Amino acid sequence: MKILYTFFLASILFCLAGCSRTSESNSRIYIEGKMSGNLIAPDAIEVKIVNEGLIISETKLASDYAFKLSGPLVSSGYSELQINKKIKSFSASKPGCILNSDSKSIQIPAGTTYLIFNEIVLE
C-alpha cells in the first residue's frame, strides 16, 4: 500500500511540474476574414501573417473567399496581414488597423492576438 501511495504522489508532482502558464513568450495570433471586390480565382490569392519580418502563417482563400490564419508570435510588436493583391478598403472587429502605403498589407496593432476582418475589399 505504501508503494502505491508513493507512486500516486509522484504522479501528481510530475503532472503539476509539467503544466505551465501561458505567457507572452508563447503568444499566438488568430485572424479570420472574408474578401470581396474585383476577385479572381480564390486559390490565386495568398494571405500571410508576418511578425518581425517572419512569415507566421500563410494560406489561400477558400472557395467562398474566406480565410483563417493562426500562428505563434515572434515578438509583441505589430504584425501585418499581407495579401498579394491591392486592398481598396477593409473593416475589422478591433480599431487601430492601418492600410500600409503599398495597399497590399494591413498593419495590426501590437498586442492584438485575435482579429476578424468583416470585409476586405480588393481592387
Image: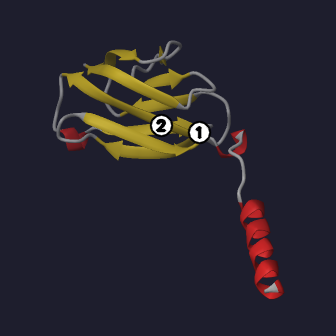
Amino acid residing under circle 2:
Tyr
Residue drawn 83% across the image and 85% down it: 2
Q: Quadrant of residue 110?
A: top right
Residue drawn 45% across the image and 31% down it: 81
Horizontal and vertical percent for residue 8? 75, 75
Left or right of residue 100: residue 75: right
The secondary structure type at the circle numbered 2 is strand
Q: Name the disc covering residue 5, or none.
A: none
Left or right of residue 23: residue 98: left
Residue annotated with mark 2: 30
The secondary structure type at the circle numbered 1 is loop
Q: Please determine whether, in this image, residue 22 is positioned above or below residue 93.
A: below
Query: Quadrant where the N terminus lies?
Result: bottom right
Q: Please determine whether, in this image, residue 67 is positioned above or below residue 105.
A: below
- Nearest the viewer among 19 and 109 is 19
Horizontal and vertical percent for residue 53? 59, 39
- Examine the rendering and report whether any part of residue 105 can be seen: yes
Residue drawn 40% across the image and 20% down it: 103
Residue neighbourhood size for the residue with mark 1, other residues' Cα within 10 Å, grouped as few (<14), some (14–19), many (≥20): few
Amino acid residing under circle 1:
Gly
Residue annotated with mark 1: 53
Query: Quadrant where the C terminus lies?
Result: top left
